Amino acid sequence: MPDLTRRSILASSLVAMPAIVRAQSPVELSFLFPVAVGGPITKIIDGYAAAFEQENPDIKLKPVYAGSYTDTLTKALTAMKGGDPAHLAVLLAVDVFTLIDQDAIVPFDTLATSAEDQSWLKSFYPAFLANGTIEGHCWGIPFQRSTVVMYWNKDAFREVGLDPEVPPATWQEHTAFAEKLTRRAGSETSRWGVEIPGSGFTYWLYQALVTQAGGALAAADGKTVTLDTKEAVAALQYWMDLAQNDKVHPPGIVEWGTTPRDFLEGRAGMIWHTTGNLSNIRTNAKFPFGVALLPADRRRGSPTGGGNFHLFKSANEAQRKAALRFVKWATTPERAAQWSIDTGYVAVRPDAWTTPAMAKYVAGFPQATVARDQLPFAVAEFSTHDNQRVTKVLDDQLQAALTGAKPAQAALQEAQHQAERLLRPYL
């Protein structure tokens, strides 16, 4: 073969090689997850990434741990505007209106179009799909989900003559049990009957009370709120009375982060908190404890909570297909069950509860079924357009009432007024 021909063939091969390499290179998929770096959750997610890549060698999944949910949302939106956007993220389900308004995400149902995909979209509990379903589109896939539940110390119940296996079923019983559980010596209180955290997710705990009172805080379209109805006022007044009149609850604001510790150290006989704390309490409690549906006033009820998968518009077609493949992989019945076992969050689809691993888990730890059993009474978490500012308005007014700075009705009327002003551009 002449040297010229040989050089031409070699040159042609070198030109073609990058295209071949590019075609064979895995699709790179960045995945924001709301947790600080380190700790058991990151190890689980890292394990997911490694297992998924092994089964899907054409996809390179890069988890990025971005701190709190708020930090993760900020990082996602900042990266989008800075030209280096994420492709997939677990963000609070209630952030969906913000993400849509920012033109940041695409609905999963526009990608999940096959019969198998459609069946998968319908496999989740309706209560967990509610926040992410807007105008007929599914914008968020349930993953790290929860409800508010009540934990109680069975030894403390037994000590004061209460049946340790029977939690309060109504607000009236809840107050009466808390009175018995409260332990004082003079002016010092060594154990409070109940603690409901008023920081961190104030509106979330409050929404549980409003639901139980028979009320609702927002319309499904996220454009209007009803924060000062008689049911809303009654709910806040009940919470205030526990501390200010009944004196069975610490005065002022109970901190979200310290509430489980107070329970574990015996400083609270009952607490309201996320089912996401279930594994922590199970691991660290030195006493037998129960988990219960929240007590009822006019009805049972809790808002759902936690995070959904969201797919960013910045992902190209290959990355969107890769993201859908990963989300389906991460939400199989077996993985939904194992995620629940490992973290305490609620398995997000009914068939996860029939897997052998979950059946074995709940046989030895029946408390894990309580959050699932509460789902028929659950409502979508409070969510609106401009959600962070609207919830801050509500949180600020709730905390003013809980600290005694304002009466319940005045606080909620002010919250309603400010929220209406923030939401006016969306009407």
Image (cartoon, grey):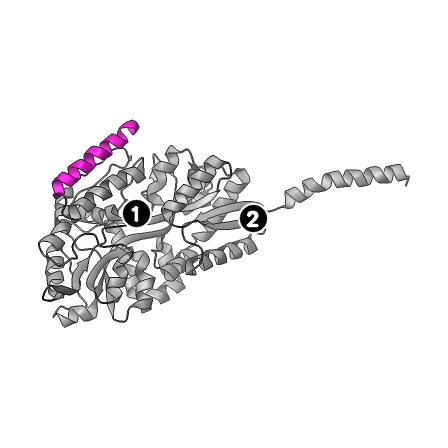
User: Main SS type for the magenta part?
Assistant: helix
Above or below for 419 versus 404: above
Instruction: Report x, y in % for residue 345.
Output: 34, 56
24 sits left or right of 274 in the view: right
> Which quadrant is the N terminus positioned in?
top right
Query: Of residues 315 and 255, which is closer to you in this image?
Result: 255
Residue depicted at x 74% and y 38%: 15
Q: Which residues are magenta?
A: 407-427
Residue depicted at x 37% and y 55%: 351
Query: Of residues 81 and 175, which is closer to you in this image?
Result: 81
- Residue occupying the far right of the picture: 2
**Badge 1 is on which residue?**
127
**Badge 2 is on which residue?**
59
Q: Is residue 276 visible?
A: yes
Query: Of residues 425 and 208, which is closer to you in this image?
Result: 425
Instruction: Report x, y in % for residue 208.
Output: 21, 49
Q: Earlier in the sequence, mark 1 or mark 2?
A: 2
Sort mark 2 into few (<14), some (14-19) or many (20+) by Cα contacts within 10 Å: many
- Residue occupying the far front of the picture: 187
Q: Give the SS element for disc 2.
A: strand
Residue depicted at x 20% and y 46%: 399
Q: Give the SS element for disc 1.
A: helix
Q: CA distance from mark 1 to mark 2?
A: 32 Å
Above or below for 360 versus 64: below
What residue type is disc 2 on? Ile
